[in-house]
Image (spheres, grey):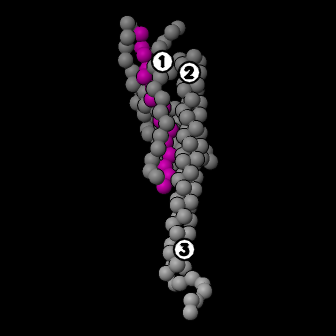
Amino acid sequence: MREKGQSLFEVILALAVVALILITVVSLAAFSVRNSSYSKNKTIAESYVQQAVEWLRGQRDTNSAFFSKNGNYCLNNLSFAITRKCSDSEKIADTIFKRDLTISKSDVSSKTVLKTEVTVSWSDGQGIHEARSITYFSDWR
């Protein structure tokens, strides 16, 4: 006589297939969320970089001491007040980002040129990330 129903082997095999599908879906969802979060943070960091470059342009145009600047600055509040790189705790207000500026001076054709490198960095579960911009400022006056 044949018995109706499923064997234990068939049930275990079906559960294994379902578990494999669920693990794949959850992994893909986690990967998608991680990429989305990174993209969002990268966009925000790039906007903070651009904000600093625009602020530096304004400083060049209005601050007579701009071309005497040299070295590292923490630009968490867009000022030259902190004359070193930002520490891990010095972030832009209410964000996960820190913004550093490195200025190096050179003379080209008897004009002072400042090479500025703005770096906005943040860390997450995947490591440390950054957005960066290098801009050259010359004394056009």
Magenta stretch, residue numbers: 111-125
**Residue type, numbered disc 3:** Ala
Q: Kindly indicate the quadrant of the structure image that contains residue 84.
A: top left
Q: Earlier in the sequence, mark 3 or mark 1?
A: 3
**Residue type, numbered disc 2:** Arg
Mark linked to residue 14: 3
Q: CA distance from mark 3 to mark 1?
A: 67 Å
Q: CA distance from mark 2 to mark 3?
A: 65 Å
Q: Is residue 135 above or below residue 76?
A: above
Mark linked to residue 57: 2
| Element at label 3 | helix
User: Nearest the camera: 94 or 4?
Assistant: 4
Residue 134 locus on image (x, y percent)? 45, 26
Residue 62 locus on image (x, y percent)? 59, 18
Q: Earlier in the sequence, mark 1 or mark 2?
A: 2
Within the magenta stretch, is there residue 139? no
Q: CA distance from mark 1 to mark 2?
A: 8 Å
Query: Does residue 13 appear in the picture of this structure?
Result: yes
User: Nearest the camera: 83 or 139?
Assistant: 139
Residue extending farthest to the right is 94
The quadrant in which the N terminus is found is bottom right
Callouts 2 and 3 close, C-beta under 8 Å? no
Q: Which residue is mark 1?
A: 137
Mark linked to residue 119: none
